Image (tube, rainbow, N blue to C red):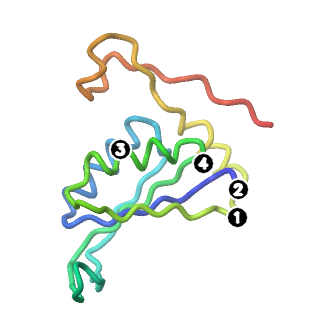
Amino acid sequence: MKYYQVMTTCPSEIEAKRIARALVEMRLAACAQVSGPVRSTYWWKGKIEKATEWVCLLKCPVRNYARIENAIRQMHSYRVPEVLAMPVGAGNKEYLEWLEAEAVPVVATDANSHTGKLSGLKRRAPAKAV
């Protein structure tokens, strides 16, 4: 599989939108969708919990997954955020070509890139299809 749909859930719409926007701006994901609220039921520290959450779906090439997971873990308010990558088995050829072309991570071009701001960043050339 060349592509993933990565999912995370957030405690608020604001946080989900912030993560979605950041990952698209960094060009780690070509597209992000936020939906909700959803009602989650899960085990946490030995008991069943319930929460209202927002779902963030990100479409990306497999090569970007590790950086996406790392970015979500840094931006997320949960100590153990849900980050799941689901393989895309098939899809609209033109859509997948668009995804490949747009999800090309930016690289730092100056010493101030450690601030996390997108100024001083430029796009890498897309990888050639094999």
Pair 2/1: label in front: 2
Label 3 vs label 1: CA separation?
25 Å
Front in this rendered view, residue 85 or 36: 85
Determine whether label 2 and label 1 are within 8 Å by CB.
Answer: yes
Left or right of 36 on screen, residue 5: right
Q: Which residue is the extreme one toward the bottom?
A: 48
Q: According to the image, label 1 marks what residue?
A: 89
The numbered mark, 1 or 4, whose residue comes first in the sequence reads: 4
Marks 3 and 2, how far apart at CA: 22 Å
Query: Marks 2 and 1, Cα distance to the nearest angstrom?
Result: 6 Å
Residue linked to disc 4: 62
For label 1, the crowd category at 10 Å Cα-Cα, with few meaning under 14, some 14 to 19 and many 20 or more, is few
Dot 2 corresponds to which residue?
1
Residue shown at 43%/46% (left/top)?
A: 68
Residue at the far right in the pictured view: 130
Give amino acid for label 1.
Gly
Q: Residue 42: x and y, percent?
A: 30, 83
- Label 2–label 4 contact, CB within 8 A: yes
Q: Work out which quarter of the rendered image holds the N terminus and state it.
A: bottom right
What's the residue at 40%, 12% (across, down)? 109
